């Protein structure tokens, strides 16, 4: 590594101001910080800094996403052979290989498209390339069905990066979660590909598709008012049709533990989402509005994934401590309300989070003003 460091130092002057390739300073800086920890320090005395920078935060998020990604690869292959009626004869290697063949192209297209735009914008604006998209680039494939066309992934990713983040100023300035913007774009622009009510399949040879294979997802059955054909165990483990990274609540909870132990995500937001969803699901089930039990509502669709990886996004969620409880509770409640009361749209997590992203600043404002008023009254009473 020392020889690589020496090489980087030797060519670095060419990319600095006045150097031969100064216009590529942002690109060079991105590769340098990817290989080595930056040695720059804050020169002002105003802010207190610690060792947890953006790179370390994003690394923790990516690490937490790995269990969902790995299981998503396996489940993609599993559903492929289940669709063909060959699940009993398929080996574990066959299942994983099919999953890799289906998922990796989506992952590559997401990263290539998003990073290309990030680098281009950084060059145009002359600022550093932020690491924020490294997490977004993995989340986008995980919220997609396995059979989504690659060109749609590229279009959705470009839309999310440009209109969901860069127009607001880049990483840390966006109002809505970029990965959800990508999913929302596909849902409203190409609803037949993202409806969430059909079992997806993956196969290069269309003539091998088994005739008569059918079976709605648990979300579709929920929206139709029918009890799910999948048992709770399979739904919790994740061996059911659905988006690549959203089916396994077990893998998602492993990621949640990583986020909580590293302090990246707020347990208050995460906990409140599950409480809001559980309470609303319980009330609807008790009233006979739906046949889906509250516990099942938490493990089907994108509920768990949204609660752990999207509702807790520090940029788009509430930042006041009390506001996090309200914000999370309303996301969980709204997601179940949309699922139960709108049969045409069985999944409600995406719209619930985007809606509360919009109102997060208002919730924070209300609590800040309430706290200011409370302190003013306390000072007034002490006088």
Image: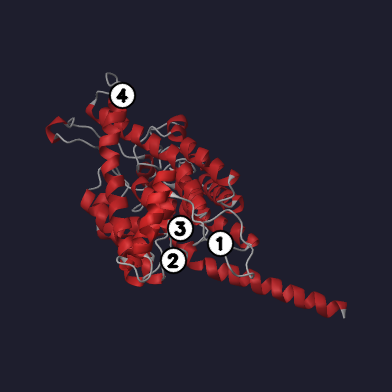
Write the residue at 43% across / 35% down. 235
* Image x and y of residue 120, in percent: 30, 64
| Cα separation between marks 2 and 1 | 26 Å
Q: Nearer the viewer, mark 1 or mark 3?
A: 1
In the image, is 355 to the left or to the right of 126? right
| Cα separation between marks 1 and 4 | 48 Å
* Image x and y of residue 366, in percent: 62, 71
| Cα separation between marks 2 and 3 | 17 Å
Residue wearing tag 3 = 352
Q: Looking at the image, do the residues carrying marks 1 and 3 touch, with CB atoms under 8 Å apart?
A: no
Camera-side residue: 267 or 53? 53
Write the residue at 35% across / 53% down. 345
Q: Is residue 299 visible?
A: yes
Disc with the residue nearer the chain's start (1 vs 3): 1
Mark linked to residue 41? 1
Disc with the residue nearer the chain's start (4 vs 3): 4
| Cα separation between marks 2 and 4 | 41 Å
């Amino acid at each position: 590594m020392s020889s690589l460091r020496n090489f980087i130092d030797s060519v670095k002057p060419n990319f600095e101001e006045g150097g031969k390739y100064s216009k590529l300073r942002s690109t060079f800086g991105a590769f340098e910080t990817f290989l080595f920890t930056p040695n720059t320090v804050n020169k002002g005395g105003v802010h207190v800094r610690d060792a947890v920078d953006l790179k370390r935060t994003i690394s923790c998020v990516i690490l937490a996403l790995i269990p969902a990604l790995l299981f998503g690869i396996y489940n993609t292959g599993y559903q492929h052979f289940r669709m063909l009626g060959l699940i009993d004869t398929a080996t574990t290697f066959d299942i994983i290989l099919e999953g890799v063949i289906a998922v990796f192209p989506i992952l590559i297209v997401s990263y290539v498209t998003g990073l290309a735009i990030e680098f281009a914008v950084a060059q145009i604006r002359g600022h550093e390339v932020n690491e924020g998209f490294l997490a977004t680039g993995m989340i986008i494939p995980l919220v997609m069905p396995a059979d989504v066309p690659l060109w749609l992934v590229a279009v959705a990713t470009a839309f999310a990066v440009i209109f969901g983040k860069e127009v607001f100023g880049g990483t840390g300035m966006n109002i809505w979660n970029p990965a959800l913007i990508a999913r929302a774009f596909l849902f409203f622009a190409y609803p037949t590909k993202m409806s969430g009510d059909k079992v997806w399949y993956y196969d290069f040879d269309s003539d091998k598709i088994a005739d008569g294979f059918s079976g709605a997802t648990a979300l579709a059955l929920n929206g139709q008012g029918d009890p799910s054909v999948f048992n709770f165990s399979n739904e919790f483990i994740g061996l059911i049709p659905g988006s690549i990274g959203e089916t396994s609540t077990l893998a998602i909870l492993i990621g949640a533990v990583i986020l909580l132990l590293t302090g990246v995500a707020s347990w208050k937001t995460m906990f409140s989402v599950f409480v809001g969803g559980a309470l609303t699901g319980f009330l609807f089930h008790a009233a006979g509005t739906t046949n889906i039990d509250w516990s099942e509502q938490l493990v089907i669709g994108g509920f768990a994934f949204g609660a752990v990886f999207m509702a807790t996004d520090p940029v788009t969620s509430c930042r006041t401590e009390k506001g996090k409880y309200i914000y999370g509770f309303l996301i969980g409640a709204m997601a179940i309300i949309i699922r139960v009361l709108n049969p045409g749209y069985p999944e409600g997590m995406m719209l619930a989070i985007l809606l509360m992203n919009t109102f997060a600043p208002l919730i924070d404002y209300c609590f800040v003003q309430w706290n200011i008023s409370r302190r003013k009254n306390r000072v007034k009473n002490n006088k």
